[in-house]
Amino acid sequence: MLINADKTQNWKSDIAQSVDFYNQWFMRFAPKAYRSTRVETTKQVEEALQRTKNLTDIGPGVLKNDPSVLPILRMATAPPIARDRLIGLAQVSGSLVRSMELDKRIPPQMKPHTLDDELQKIGEVIKTLADRDILTWLDSGKKPGEQERYRAATIVADRLCGAVADPIIRNEQEKRQLAAIKRWLESRGYTYVEPRLIEKPDAMKPASFSFRLNVPVKQSGRTKQVNIPIDVVVMPKKTMRGKFPILIEAKSAGDFTNVNKRRKEEATKVNQLHATYGKGVQFILFLCGYFDSGYLGYEAAEGIDWVWEHRIDDLAILGL
Protein backbone atom coordinates (compact mmCIF):
# COMPACT_ATOMS: atom_id res chain seq x y z
CA MET A 1 0.00 0.00 0.00
CA LEU A 2 1.41 3.34 -1.06
CA ILE A 3 1.57 6.20 1.44
CA ASN A 4 1.99 9.39 -0.59
CA ALA A 5 3.53 8.53 -3.96
CA ASP A 6 0.15 7.88 -5.59
CA LYS A 7 -1.73 10.77 -3.98
CA THR A 8 -0.85 13.54 -6.43
CA GLN A 9 -3.93 15.50 -5.37
CA ASN A 10 -2.26 16.10 -1.98
CA TRP A 11 1.21 17.04 -3.20
CA LYS A 12 0.65 20.79 -3.52
CA SER A 13 -0.80 21.09 -0.01
CA ASP A 14 1.90 18.85 1.49
CA ILE A 15 4.68 20.83 -0.17
CA ALA A 16 3.33 24.07 1.31
CA GLN A 17 2.97 22.52 4.79
CA SER A 18 6.46 21.01 4.60
CA VAL A 19 8.01 24.36 3.63
CA ASP A 20 6.20 26.05 6.55
CA PHE A 21 7.32 23.28 8.92
CA TYR A 22 10.97 23.67 7.86
CA ASN A 23 10.87 27.48 8.02
CA GLN A 24 9.41 27.47 11.52
CA TRP A 25 12.17 25.14 12.70
CA PHE A 26 14.82 27.22 10.97
CA MET A 27 13.69 30.47 12.59
CA ARG A 28 13.64 28.87 16.06
CA PHE A 29 16.76 26.72 16.03
CA ALA A 30 19.11 27.63 13.17
CA PRO A 31 20.49 30.78 14.84
CA LYS A 32 21.23 28.78 18.00
CA ALA A 33 23.00 26.06 16.02
CA TYR A 34 24.99 28.66 14.11
CA ARG A 35 25.98 30.53 17.28
CA SER A 36 27.18 27.41 19.09
CA THR A 37 29.26 26.43 16.06
CA ARG A 38 30.64 29.97 15.89
CA VAL A 39 31.77 29.82 19.53
CA GLU A 40 33.62 26.54 18.94
CA THR A 41 35.10 27.81 15.68
CA THR A 42 36.37 30.98 17.39
CA LYS A 43 38.29 28.79 19.86
CA GLN A 44 39.81 26.87 16.95
CA VAL A 45 40.88 30.10 15.25
CA GLU A 46 42.47 31.38 18.47
CA GLU A 47 44.41 28.13 18.78
CA ALA A 48 45.52 28.45 15.15
CA LEU A 49 46.75 31.98 15.82
CA GLN A 50 48.78 30.71 18.74
CA ARG A 51 50.29 27.86 16.71
CA THR A 52 51.29 30.20 13.88
CA LYS A 53 52.60 32.87 16.28
CA ASN A 54 49.73 35.16 15.29
CA LEU A 55 50.21 34.37 11.58
CA THR A 56 53.85 35.43 11.59
CA ASP A 57 55.05 31.85 11.16
CA ILE A 58 53.34 29.95 8.32
CA GLY A 59 56.33 27.93 7.26
CA PRO A 60 56.48 24.27 6.18
CA GLY A 61 57.15 23.10 9.73
CA VAL A 62 53.94 24.60 11.12
CA LEU A 63 51.82 23.37 8.21
CA LYS A 64 53.24 19.85 8.46
CA ASN A 65 52.56 19.69 12.19
CA ASP A 66 48.99 20.95 11.81
CA PRO A 67 47.59 20.58 8.26
CA SER A 68 44.04 21.28 9.49
CA VAL A 69 44.95 24.93 10.06
CA LEU A 70 44.80 25.64 6.31
CA PRO A 71 41.04 26.45 6.03
CA ILE A 72 41.47 28.99 8.83
CA LEU A 73 44.40 30.59 7.04
CA ARG A 74 42.34 30.92 3.84
CA MET A 75 39.68 32.84 5.74
CA ALA A 76 42.28 35.17 7.28
CA THR A 77 43.11 36.75 3.91
CA ALA A 78 41.66 39.75 2.09
CA PRO A 79 39.64 38.70 0.29
CA PRO A 80 39.08 35.25 1.81
CA ILE A 81 40.10 32.71 -0.82
CA ALA A 82 38.49 29.45 -1.86
CA ARG A 83 40.44 26.21 -1.82
CA ASP A 84 40.82 26.02 -5.59
CA ARG A 85 41.88 29.68 -5.73
CA LEU A 86 44.68 28.95 -3.25
CA ILE A 87 45.82 26.02 -5.38
CA GLY A 88 45.96 28.26 -8.44
CA LEU A 89 47.66 31.20 -6.76
CA ALA A 90 50.30 29.07 -5.06
CA GLN A 91 50.63 26.77 -8.09
CA VAL A 92 50.75 23.71 -5.88
CA SER A 93 49.30 20.22 -6.03
CA GLY A 94 45.53 20.12 -5.59
CA SER A 95 45.81 16.74 -3.88
CA LEU A 96 48.12 18.27 -1.26
CA VAL A 97 45.67 21.05 -0.36
CA ARG A 98 42.64 18.76 -0.39
CA SER A 99 44.43 16.19 1.77
CA MET A 100 45.37 18.88 4.30
CA GLU A 101 41.84 20.27 4.47
CA LEU A 102 39.63 17.21 4.06
CA ASP A 103 41.78 14.45 5.57
CA LYS A 104 43.74 16.74 7.91
CA ARG A 105 47.01 15.13 6.93
CA ILE A 106 49.98 15.49 4.61
CA PRO A 107 49.96 13.02 1.67
CA PRO A 108 52.45 10.32 2.75
CA GLN A 109 53.67 9.69 -0.79
CA MET A 110 55.01 13.22 -1.36
CA LYS A 111 58.78 13.58 -1.49
CA PRO A 112 60.11 15.69 1.42
CA HIS A 113 61.78 18.38 -0.71
CA THR A 114 58.70 18.72 -2.94
CA LEU A 115 56.47 18.95 0.11
CA ASP A 116 58.56 21.67 1.74
CA ASP A 117 58.66 23.65 -1.49
CA GLU A 118 54.88 23.54 -1.96
CA LEU A 119 54.13 24.33 1.69
CA GLN A 120 56.47 27.29 1.46
CA LYS A 121 54.49 28.57 -1.56
CA ILE A 122 51.22 28.19 0.32
CA GLY A 123 52.62 30.12 3.28
CA GLU A 124 53.85 32.92 1.06
CA VAL A 125 50.43 33.36 -0.56
CA ILE A 126 48.76 33.53 2.86
CA LYS A 127 51.30 36.07 4.12
CA THR A 128 50.90 38.24 1.03
CA LEU A 129 47.10 38.27 1.21
CA ALA A 130 46.75 38.37 5.03
CA ASP A 131 43.94 40.73 6.02
CA ARG A 132 45.81 43.49 7.82
CA ASP A 133 42.59 45.30 8.71
CA ILE A 134 41.81 42.56 11.22
CA LEU A 135 45.35 41.24 11.82
CA THR A 136 46.47 44.75 12.78
CA TRP A 137 49.66 43.62 14.49
CA LEU A 138 51.19 42.46 11.20
CA ASP A 139 51.86 46.07 10.17
CA SER A 140 52.71 47.43 13.60
CA GLY A 141 55.10 44.60 14.41
CA LYS A 142 53.77 44.52 17.98
CA LYS A 143 52.49 41.44 19.74
CA PRO A 144 48.68 41.53 19.76
CA GLY A 145 46.80 41.87 23.01
CA GLU A 146 44.29 39.26 24.11
CA GLN A 147 41.31 41.38 23.07
CA GLU A 148 42.87 42.22 19.72
CA ARG A 149 43.54 38.57 18.96
CA TYR A 150 40.04 37.56 20.08
CA ARG A 151 38.44 40.18 17.85
CA ALA A 152 40.38 38.90 14.84
CA ALA A 153 39.46 35.32 15.73
CA THR A 154 35.73 36.12 15.83
CA ILE A 155 35.87 37.73 12.39
CA VAL A 156 37.72 34.77 10.86
CA ALA A 157 35.30 32.39 12.63
CA ASP A 158 32.36 34.26 11.09
CA ARG A 159 33.89 33.79 7.67
CA LEU A 160 34.46 30.09 8.29
CA CYS A 161 30.91 29.56 9.55
CA GLY A 162 29.52 31.52 6.62
CA ALA A 163 31.37 29.22 4.24
CA VAL A 164 29.88 26.12 5.89
CA ALA A 165 26.51 27.50 7.02
CA ASP A 166 24.50 25.06 4.91
CA PRO A 167 26.29 21.94 6.24
CA ILE A 168 25.85 23.25 9.79
CA ILE A 169 22.10 23.59 9.29
CA ARG A 170 21.82 20.23 7.45
CA ASN A 171 23.63 18.48 10.30
CA GLU A 172 21.30 19.98 12.91
CA GLN A 173 18.25 19.20 10.81
CA GLU A 174 19.32 15.57 10.40
CA LYS A 175 19.80 15.23 14.15
CA ARG A 176 16.33 16.64 14.70
CA GLN A 177 14.71 14.36 12.13
CA LEU A 178 16.31 11.24 13.61
CA ALA A 179 15.30 12.35 17.11
CA ALA A 180 11.70 12.75 15.92
CA ILE A 181 11.68 9.23 14.46
CA LYS A 182 13.29 7.85 17.63
CA ARG A 183 10.59 9.42 19.83
CA TRP A 184 7.84 8.14 17.55
CA LEU A 185 9.17 4.57 17.52
CA GLU A 186 9.96 4.40 21.24
CA SER A 187 6.49 5.66 22.11
CA ARG A 188 5.20 2.56 20.30
CA GLY A 189 7.43 0.10 22.14
CA TYR A 190 10.43 -0.06 19.78
CA THR A 191 13.97 -0.40 21.13
CA TYR A 192 17.08 1.27 19.72
CA VAL A 193 20.05 -1.00 18.92
CA GLU A 194 23.59 0.22 18.24
CA PRO A 195 24.55 -0.51 14.61
CA ARG A 196 27.77 -2.28 15.75
CA LEU A 197 25.59 -4.91 17.44
CA ILE A 198 23.72 -5.80 14.24
CA GLU A 199 25.35 -8.61 12.30
CA LYS A 200 23.05 -8.25 9.30
CA PRO A 201 19.81 -6.33 8.69
CA ASP A 202 17.51 -9.33 8.32
CA ALA A 203 18.73 -10.72 11.65
CA MET A 204 17.33 -7.78 13.62
CA LYS A 205 14.79 -8.61 16.31
CA PRO A 206 11.16 -7.51 15.90
CA ALA A 207 10.35 -4.07 17.39
CA SER A 208 13.97 -2.88 17.08
CA PHE A 209 15.56 -0.07 15.11
CA SER A 210 18.95 1.46 14.44
CA PHE A 211 20.46 4.57 12.89
CA ARG A 212 23.14 4.91 10.19
CA LEU A 213 23.47 1.20 9.53
CA ASN A 214 25.73 0.08 6.70
CA VAL A 215 23.83 -2.31 4.42
CA PRO A 216 25.88 -4.38 1.91
CA VAL A 217 24.67 -4.21 -1.72
CA LYS A 218 25.78 -5.40 -5.13
CA GLN A 219 27.04 -2.82 -7.58
CA SER A 220 26.42 -3.22 -11.27
CA GLY A 221 29.46 -4.66 -13.02
CA ARG A 222 31.31 -5.42 -9.78
CA THR A 223 31.78 -8.73 -8.01
CA LYS A 224 32.49 -7.34 -4.55
CA GLN A 225 29.71 -5.91 -2.41
CA VAL A 226 29.86 -2.39 -1.02
CA ASN A 227 28.19 -0.87 2.01
CA ILE A 228 25.64 1.91 1.69
CA PRO A 229 24.61 3.86 4.81
CA ILE A 230 20.92 3.88 5.69
CA ASP A 231 19.68 6.54 8.12
CA VAL A 232 16.99 4.46 9.84
CA VAL A 233 16.48 0.68 9.78
CA VAL A 234 13.34 -0.65 11.49
CA MET A 235 12.20 -4.23 12.04
CA PRO A 236 8.41 -4.15 12.56
CA LYS A 237 6.83 -5.78 15.61
CA LYS A 238 4.85 -8.24 13.53
CA THR A 239 7.30 -9.78 11.12
CA MET A 240 8.36 -13.19 9.87
CA ARG A 241 11.83 -14.59 10.54
CA GLY A 242 14.28 -13.54 7.83
CA LYS A 243 12.08 -10.65 6.72
CA PHE A 244 14.05 -7.59 5.60
CA PRO A 245 13.59 -4.46 7.76
CA ILE A 246 12.06 -1.20 6.56
CA LEU A 247 14.68 1.31 5.40
CA ILE A 248 14.11 5.03 5.90
CA GLU A 249 16.22 7.86 4.49
CA ALA A 250 15.86 11.21 6.29
CA LYS A 251 16.07 14.14 3.89
CA SER A 252 15.65 17.87 4.38
CA ALA A 253 16.11 20.86 2.10
CA GLY A 254 16.14 24.60 2.74
CA ASP A 255 15.37 25.59 -0.84
CA PHE A 256 14.04 24.12 -4.08
CA THR A 257 17.28 24.64 -6.03
CA ASN A 258 19.35 21.64 -5.03
CA VAL A 259 16.83 18.86 -4.41
CA ASN A 260 16.48 17.86 -8.05
CA LYS A 261 20.26 17.55 -8.34
CA ARG A 262 20.23 14.99 -5.53
CA ARG A 263 17.17 12.97 -6.49
CA LYS A 264 19.14 10.38 -8.47
CA GLU A 265 21.00 9.36 -5.32
CA GLU A 266 17.90 7.72 -3.88
CA ALA A 267 17.05 6.03 -7.18
CA THR A 268 20.55 4.53 -7.38
CA LYS A 269 20.35 3.37 -3.77
CA VAL A 270 16.95 1.70 -4.13
CA ASN A 271 17.98 -0.03 -7.37
CA GLN A 272 21.04 -1.48 -5.63
CA LEU A 273 18.90 -2.65 -2.71
CA HIS A 274 16.35 -4.30 -5.00
CA ALA A 275 19.08 -5.98 -7.05
CA THR A 276 20.59 -7.42 -3.87
CA TYR A 277 17.57 -8.26 -1.71
CA GLY A 278 14.64 -8.33 -4.11
CA LYS A 279 11.80 -5.98 -5.02
CA GLY A 280 10.12 -6.53 -1.67
CA VAL A 281 12.55 -4.24 0.16
CA GLN A 282 10.73 -1.16 1.46
CA PHE A 283 12.75 2.03 1.04
CA ILE A 284 10.98 5.15 2.30
CA LEU A 285 11.99 8.81 2.34
CA PHE A 286 11.31 10.97 5.40
CA LEU A 287 10.95 14.47 3.98
CA CYS A 288 11.04 17.91 5.53
CA GLY A 289 11.38 21.19 3.66
CA TYR A 290 11.51 22.25 0.06
CA PHE A 291 10.66 19.25 -2.11
CA ASP A 292 8.69 20.27 -5.20
CA SER A 293 6.40 18.26 -7.46
CA GLY A 294 9.25 17.64 -9.92
CA TYR A 295 11.24 15.89 -7.20
CA LEU A 296 8.23 13.96 -5.94
CA GLY A 297 7.23 12.86 -9.44
CA TYR A 298 10.74 11.59 -10.16
CA GLU A 299 10.88 9.57 -6.94
CA ALA A 300 7.38 8.15 -7.48
CA ALA A 301 8.37 7.06 -11.00
CA GLU A 302 11.35 5.24 -9.49
CA GLY A 303 9.03 3.35 -7.14
CA ILE A 304 10.05 5.34 -4.06
CA ASP A 305 7.43 6.39 -1.52
CA TRP A 306 7.75 8.93 1.28
CA VAL A 307 6.44 10.16 4.63
CA TRP A 308 6.26 13.89 5.39
CA GLU A 309 7.67 14.90 8.74
CA HIS A 310 4.71 17.20 9.37
CA ARG A 311 2.57 14.02 9.16
CA ILE A 312 4.92 11.63 10.92
CA ASP A 313 2.05 9.37 12.02
CA ASP A 314 1.91 8.12 8.42
CA LEU A 315 4.76 5.84 9.47
CA ALA A 316 2.07 3.65 10.99
CA ILE A 317 0.88 2.80 7.47
CA LEU A 318 4.11 0.81 7.11
CA GLY A 319 2.90 -1.50 9.85
CA LEU A 320 5.17 -0.03 12.51
Image (spheres, grey):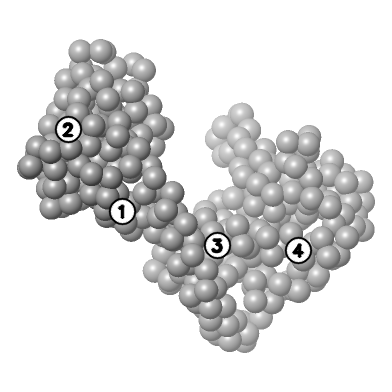
User: Which residue in the protein does label 4 denote?
Assistant: 183
Query: Between residues 155 and 305, which one lies in front from this camera angle?
Result: 155
User: Which residue in the protein does label 3 denote?
Assistant: 173
Q: Earlier in the sequence, mark 4 or mark 3?
A: 3
Q: Where is residue 20 in the image (x, y as percent from the top left)?
A: 53, 81
User: Which residue in the protein does label 1 denote?
Assistant: 154
Is 180 above or below relative to 156? below
Task: Estimate how packed mark 3 is, as few (under 14), some (14 to 19) or many (20 or more) residues with alpha carbons within 10 Å.
Answer: many
Residue appearing at x 34%, y 16% in the figure: 109
Residue 265 appears anywhere in the view: yes
Q: Which of marks 2 and 4 is nearer the N terminus?
A: 2
Query: Between residues 260 and 25, which one lies in front from this camera angle?
Result: 25
**Residue type at tag 2:** Thr
Q: How far apart are marks 1 and 4 (CA)?
A: 37 Å
Q: Position of residue 310 (x, y in %)?
A: 65, 76
Is 105 above or below relative to 132? above
Q: Is mark 1 on a helix, strand or loop?
A: helix
**Residue type at tag 4:** Arg
In front: label 1 or label 4: 1
